[in-house]
């Protein structure tokens, strides 16, 4: 679960969430993504960014208002 204050939806908070998501994706799927990017000649960083955004939807958020 990710705990956020309702007032903490700033750009910095969004960047922090994406960075955390990117680290989760690297831990879970890093080797598979690298293999896929190499095989299909795609940009690994772009793939990580896209998967990190998708991964954000799997989080459970708790907002303290």
Image (tube, helix red, strand yellow):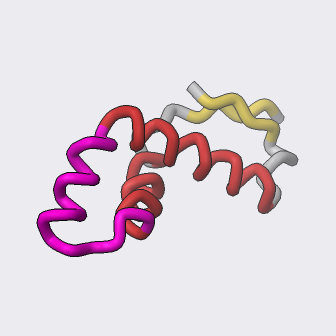
Where's the C terminus, which quadrant? top right
Magenta stretch prevailing secondary structure: helix
- Is residue 18 found left or right of 26 in the rendered image? right
- Is residue 30 found left or right of 45 in the rendered image? left
The image shows residue 57 at horizontal and vertical percentages of 43, 47
* Residue projecting furthest to the left: 39
Q: Quadrant of residue 11?
A: bottom right
- Is residue 1 found left or right of 42 in the rendered image? right
Which residue corresponds to the image point at 62% horizontal and 30% vertical from the top-left?
Answer: 2
37 to 42, vertically: above or below = above
51 to 40, vertically: above or below = above
What are the residue bounds of the magenta stretch? 29-45
63 or 8: nearer the viewer: 8
The image shows residue 21 at horizontal and vertical percentages of 52, 44
Q: Quadrant of residue 14?
A: bottom right
Which residue corresponds to the image point at 59% horizontal and 41% vertical from the top-left?
Answer: 20
The image shows residue 37 at horizontal and vertical percentages of 24, 63
* Residue projecting furthest to the right: 7
Which residue corresponds to the image point at 21% horizontal and 45% vertical from the top-left?
Answer: 32
14 or 27: nearer the viewer: 27
* Residue projecting furthest to the top: 1
6 to 46, vertically: above or below = above
52 to 65, vertically: above or below = below
């Amino acid at each position: 679960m990710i705990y956020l204050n309702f007032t903490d939806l700033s750009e910095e908070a969004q960047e922090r969430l994406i960075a955390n998501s990117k680290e989760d994706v690297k831990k879970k799927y890093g080797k598979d993504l690298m293999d896929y990017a190499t095989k299909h000649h795609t940009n690994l960083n772009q793939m990580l960014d896209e998967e990190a955004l998708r991964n954000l939807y799997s989080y459970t958020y708790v907002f303290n208002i």
